[in-house]
Image (spheres, rainbow, N blue to C red):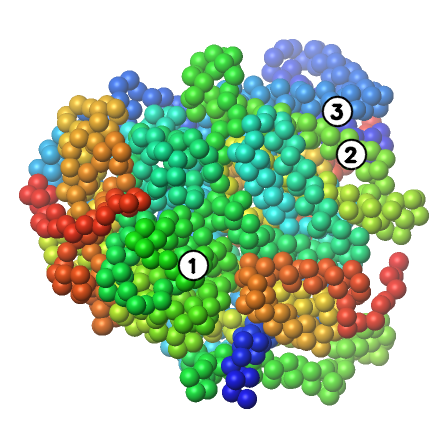
Amino acid sequence: MSTTEPRASHEAASLAGPPRRRGAVREIARRVASAVVQGRRRHPVLSRLLVTVLAVCVALVVTGLVSGVTDLDLATGAAMSIVILGLSFLTGFSGQVSLGNGAFFGVGCYVFAIFANHNNTSIGEDLLVCTAAGALAGLIVGLPATRLRGPYLAGMTIAVAIAFGSLIDQFSTWTNGDQGLNVQSPVTPPAWLANFIGAPISSLRATYMWRADITVVVAGIAFFLMANLFQSRRGRSMRLMRENEVAAELVGVSLPAARVTAFVVAAACAGLGGGLTTLVDTTVFGSLFSLSLSIQILTLLVIGGIGTLSGSLIGGLLYAYSITWIAELVSGIGLNSTSNLSSEMNNIIFGALLVITVLVAPLGIAGTLRFAISRRLAGRRSQN
Amino acid sequence: MSATRLRRILTPVAVVAMGFGLVVTSLTAGSASASTSPKAGVPGVTAHSITIGGTEPLTGIASSGYNEVSEAANAVFKWVNSHPSMHAYVHNRTINYDIIDDCYATPGFGCTGNSNELHDTDTLISKPVFATFGSLGTPTQAPMRAVLRAAKVPQLLVNSPSIDFNCGVAHAKNTQPYSQYEGCGAVKGSTKSAVFPNTFGFQTSYPAESMILGQYIKHNYASKKVCFLGQDDDFGHDGEIGLTYEGIHPAIADYYNLTLLVLDGASSITPYITAFSSAHCTLVYVDGIPGAVAAALGNANALTYTPQWVISSVGSDPQTLAGLLGAGAPLEKGAITFAPLPSTTDSNPWNAWDHLVLKADPQPKYWGTVTNATLLNGNEAIGIAEGVAFVEALHAAGATFTRASFVADLLKDTFQTPGLTPLKYTAANHQGLIGGYVSIVSATGVTTGRTSPAPGVDGQKKVYVTTGTKGAKVTLSHRVSTTVPAWLR
Amino acid sequence: MDAFLTSRNVSDILHGLVNGVVFGLVGLGLVLIWRATRVLNFALGAMATGGAYLGLGLLSYQVPFWWCFLLAIPAGMLLGGLTERFLVRPLYGKPEINPIVAMVGLLILIEAVVGSIWGTRQRSVLPPFSYVDFHLGANVVQLSPLAVFQVTAAVVLALAIGALFRFTNLGLQLRASAVAPEVSRLLGVRVSRMLTLGWMLACGVAAVAAVIVSSGFISGLTPSGMEGPFAAGFIAAAVGGLESPTGALVGGVSLGILESFVTDYWNPNLVLPVSLLVLVVVLMVRPHGLFTRQVVRRV
């Protein structure tokens, strides 16, 4: 806030009143900013909690204002942002790349669907189970990570992503093979919500809003927990591992344990995101979890910004809206929507963006913005 | 200010900023769809128009061939809209068909649409459409039954032979509509029956088709050892159940994985054919998509294995197979198959009319320039048949109707359609067509793909019908729709 | 002898050979690139596909099969050279993850560009060989003239690459640049040119693998069709130790045969999981593969 607020209020002030009030507004903004800084320094967890609650509240209000379709997109993006956040931790903190997170996501989807269909449990329990299942899958795949490094591991995870489709069919008594599974509305919106928006409980509007609300709240919890993990001592020592493994070992990081932990955390996030996605979509089938999903998760992470919270949010947002944007672009430039070129436009754009990001802005959108802002601030300070 | 402290401050700032970004995006995106508030009266219907919608695989994994179905139905609507007499027949309402590309709910594989089926269906609901019509696919449409039921939007003529769309009334557990798959069960394995009174299928069901083919096998190939290859979903499993209803118990029944077929192509089918060959099966029944059928035929040829082939209508379209098999196209010759519609290679009135309709479409998308000599394929024929069925239903609904009265009229009347059997829905039967021809892929193979009458049972071109349920009989019938009704000409 | 050749186990081995040589060639390509530049080329499968499509695209212009086959090789090499020069070179010395991500980006991009030009429908190119298996009396030997051609082409190519490295001055320079770039530079070897050449050779080899895949009966090539062979090729190369060309080839063929046995005796769904298990077990026991000596990690 110390960066954007003063400028914004500066412009607002110059529009609203005589120039002499400018100084006062700036002063207030400065005080707010410094209070935030002070608060953050003294009570980092508390201030993170506040920010999370604020963001979640804003998002909840939004879900009440928009249409059912938008609620659906919002929930899809929020669920995916958790998956990306998990990979962000794995890659940003332990320096490992996983191209198999689509499989962990799939584990979450299937476990959620099977568990919710067979048990009369609350949504909270369902989500805990699919998170745990994701974590377990991560532990199994992550164990070799104690001995494998970089490219070996990345190559292995590719094989995991491709093998996942066969495994789904192998367990077709549970997964229903090519047919997939339907989930019969695991949640029903409460009466007060329906009254609040003035739509019947059974209406799609109320149903989607409620699902989006659950997703937003769960995403808020996940982001809060991960933010604390990112800033914890353990998190920071793991970050060192990415820079220099030997140095990390010297400060007492157990490399194998840290690698497996990172894998488990990433897979748990993917499992949770998968469970939420199934809650929203109410259907799961095998062809969703191809290698391209795993690749897409990595792409969104890199473009959003590795190792940052905001980067994961950007990634989730791109996941939910990029299809619509690119479809509009395709029709905007007058391409036949069924031509081969427009069919591949999505991948051409994302593939090119990924390559450009690595070459030009390896920090991604979030990291690059943050870097630019901090440089600008530093410049301003030196002027002062 | 140190760099680390700065970063700590900026992280939540950025998160909040992103949150607001999300808000702004959502609001702008939301306002676009929210602005079209439902008008008073019947949703999607005005005095001069009716809007229906469908989710279709125009691009992506299942688009090849299937992208033509809805466009062919739309060609019928354009034909009716542009002829004053026909326009009067549907009470002077212009039919608008809103086709949304759902990529078979599968991202990738060249998908340009939004592959989230719920998003696409909800887009149609909030448009609003009067009903969905001809949406394609079992895994895509089965989950949408509950969504459309909640929105009170009829789900008409779903383009799938699955029994999942025949759930007009509650069924007892372990009757056919459950099968081993979800069917009309509330969820997989549930004892509760889900009821979808506004959901209607169109095509002859998987078990009905395999019962009819099963009876043919029983009469003509009683001495043959049967092996079965099915797709690992209700297509394969309900198909095999239909065979067992007719007393045919395959020596080997295997199910291929669609995902592996897409990934590995023909080699994923090799082990099954090798096993059938080693077991010396003399008749192989395939309930698979054209890609699987082509792979099965090719693999058998590599082993010089020549059983009698019996192929479901979904996988046997000679035009589609010719594209896949190339020079190997004659391999399909002599295969027994099933046809719910009059053959596109016969000279019959409906086939001629299909040509007229497709030739007249001002924006032909997938079939290119149609001349009288163009060989239409099964996808185009089924799309046209569904389009005609809807036009008939719209006529039957009268000048004023509601969603409820439309469905009530749908249950009351019998419709001709180009189908070989009448389209007669009842409360207990929302399936649609109930039978068709047994035919043989002709000797001339690919380029003409002629089908001829099935010898053996009666030597005549006869239609077989069955409800496809346990204990039901396969009975001989006659073709209902031999001419194009006057109002369509 | 006849009974032996048509027996179930021999059939499985013969059947696994074609897949095996494809995996071996992809593995060989990965090893060549890894040795030269320490980059695991995740886009190798897609680059091979690109090369094969460029070559095979000519088929629609009535160019004879043999020309298309031969042209796929320089097409693949061109792609490899361009990639090394413009995409990989700026990333030398950057964190290990950067080239990995760049290669993933290239993978998406190439598959998309190929798809936008030729569509995603399977394209198969039937070579002038029959795919119908040989007969011994009434029994079938699971080997067709086509399979013989495919295996022969792979073996000839592998031998040619081996000869290039072992017996030519160029091969010596290639090996030297990979093993000791600094020393080689001092001795006057144009190391950067050698690295580019290494990439070109690897992608040319992989393009042949893609052509072999595309020439199978109705199991032709799609833009994403080399993803499966890439995963298997990687497993083969990693089991062999990523450093050893022989290891990759032996690993590939063994893996192909193993997969054939798993399919026949067990279940096609278990092919990749079993391969993965083999990889994990081998690497847990010998982290640097079966064919390379353990090296001390450099700081």
Q: Nearer the viewer, mark 1 or mark 2?
A: 1
Q: Amino acid at mark 1?
A: Ala
- Residue occupied by mark 1: B253
Question: What element does badge 3 sit on?
Answer: helix
Label 3 neighbourhood size at 10 Å, few (<14), some (14-19), many (20+)?
many
- Residue shown at 41% from the left, 62% from the top: B251
Q: Amino acid at mark 3?
A: Arg
In this rendering, position of residue C260 left or right of residue B208: right
User: Where is residue B488 shown, x and y percent of the image?
Assistant: 11, 43
Q: Quadrant of the N terminus of chain B?
A: top right
Cα gap from disc 1 to disc 2, whole angstroms: 52 Å
- Residue shown at 72% from the left, 66% from the top: C238
Specify whether disc 1 shares its chain with disc 2: no
Q: Nearer the viewer, mark 3 or mark 1?
A: 1
Q: Which label is found at residue A229?
A: 2
Q: Amino acid at mark 2?
A: Leu
Specify whether disc 3 shares its chain with disc 1: no
Is mark 3 in CB contact (under 8 Å) with mark 1?
Answer: no
Q: Is residue A337 above or below residue C16?
A: above
Q: Which label is found at residue A273?
A: none
Label 1 neighbourhood size at 10 Å, few (<14), some (14-19), many (20+)?
some
Q: Chain of mark 2?
A: A
Q: Chain of mark 1?
A: B
Along the line of sight, which residue is nearer the eye, B230 or B292? Answer: B230
Q: Which label is found at residue A48?
A: 3
In this rendering, position of residue B344 left or right of residue A171: left
